[in-house]
Amino acid sequence: METLNHLMEGFSVAFTVRHVLLAFAGCIMGLVVGAMPGIGSLAGVALLLPLTFNFDPTAGIILLGALYYSNMFGGAFSSILLNVPGDSPAIMTTLDGYPMAQKGKPGQALFTSNVSSFLGGMIGWVILVMSGPALARFGLKFGPPEMALLFLLAMTSISWLIDGKVSKGLVITCFGMVLATMGMDALIGHARYHFGSIYLLGGLPFISIAIGLVGFATVIELMGVRHDPVKINESRLTIRGSLLSRRELRRITLPVLRSGFLGTFIGVLPGAGATAGSMMCYAIQRKFKNEEPLGSGAVEGIAAVESANNAAAAGAFAPLLALGIPGSGTGAVLLGGLMMWGLNPGPLLFTNHADFAWGLIASLFITNIMALMVSLMVIPWIIKVIKVPIPILILSITIVCFVGSYSTSGSMFGVLLMVLAGFVGFTMKKYGYPRAPLILAFVLSRNFELNIRRSFLMSSGSFSIFLGSTIAIVEVLILLIVIIIPLSKAIYGKVKGIK
């Protein structure tokens, strides 16, 4: 009852004319920033932060929070229509979103993305309201050993993205892990695999690699193959024509619910973030029944990814507000904004500054609705991108890739790396090597290495630290189950074949 009273007070703060207008402005900017490859929520929030210096804390955080939250909606636009991920969490959206658009269903793909984002965000918001501080305290129990095991468990899910190409998938996974180790060692500051180049000291920029592997590889493919224009029924270039059938709505229900809950939990964990959440939930979705194979334009794949990243974005506010622990780079910028306004995040924030904390939480609900309405309204116009002639589309995607890569790296090195990654991605696809394991391994390897090395430092090299808590023991048991079940099935299949 007390929580409900605080929430009502938060809505009274959020529903002022000024705060609603700020939430709407942040929503529009977040959608635009999310749809522009290479910028992302981190750069968007960082660039907008100086403009909020003269704002009161509540108004400032509502604007920044709305931009961050709606950014998860916008990232799917370019992923689905151009096969160029707008931001990191939307990388997995390209796997099913772009193929679905190429089937002549861009409206349905965008509608699935928008609705799933909204529902996943609502799940995350409800959990944040009901158990935000408690959830944040639970997330604190995940020390380096527990986080290392969690990322190891996620790494084993790479096998779920391979679909029978085990040997090729393992090679690509190892390649992704090697790429992730390039640059300065985050623990002791030792330079690794930099080959005498100052550009490699900071590691390979992930966005440049992702844009190259997925987006620029598409450009190369379009240049080398004659493509007929995608056929779209003109009568379906409307919101009504983009609606999902009842069967498709039933297909996305369970993935949305499952990824919404899991994504919220992952968003609470420090260092995990929406990107890891979307990748883990997509990998998990492969273990469940899908009417179409994931990767071929299945609505289940889009629903799982988009629900997860919005839920994770909502979950990330729990440790940020209740404990002062950012779950991502964007969270760190928001934390800097709170401290700039003279607020100290922690358990007392909900007591001493209840109007601020609950006003922000209420504004996320408003932003979620605004982002859904705006995203649905622009569908009839934005899906016309798919009807652009191939030569113009090639030029447009190329410009987007170059601008996105340059903006994320600030130098031509990022652009050159993107072009190189594009040729690598094109070659991988041509010879049947999956690209998803490389992206997943690259994202997770750095956090996995950092946490496992911290664990060994804490235990002086003893493996016993990975069995030192109930959470760690449960993770080890799950890990063994994940490894043993596929091996058992393979052995049983071979024995049965011999008989």
Image (cartoon, helix red, strand yellow):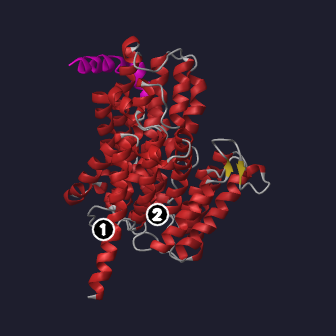
Mark 2 highlights which residue? 387
Is residue 372 in sight in this rendering? no
Identify the residue at horizontal 60%, vertical 32% (top origin): 47
Q: Is residue 9 above or below residue 189?
A: above
Amino acid type at mark 2: Lys
Residue 240: x and y in percent read: 28, 53
Mark 1 highlights which residue? 292
Q: Quick one: 203 or 304, which is closer to the camera?
A: 203
Q: Is residue 136 above or below residue 340?
A: below
Task: Assess whether mark 1 and mark 2 are in contact (beta carbons under 8 angstroms).
Answer: no
Identify the residue at horizontal 56%, vertical 49% (top origin): 449
Which numbered disc flags the more N-terminal residue, 2 or 1? Answer: 1
Residue 350: x and y in percent read: 37, 17
Identify the residue at horizontal 29%, vertical 57% (top origin): 241
Q: CA distance from mark 2 to mark 1?
A: 25 Å
Q: Quick one: 391 or 432, which is closer to the camera?
A: 432
What are the residue bounds of the magenta stretch? 1-23
Q: Is residue 53 above or below residue 469?
A: above
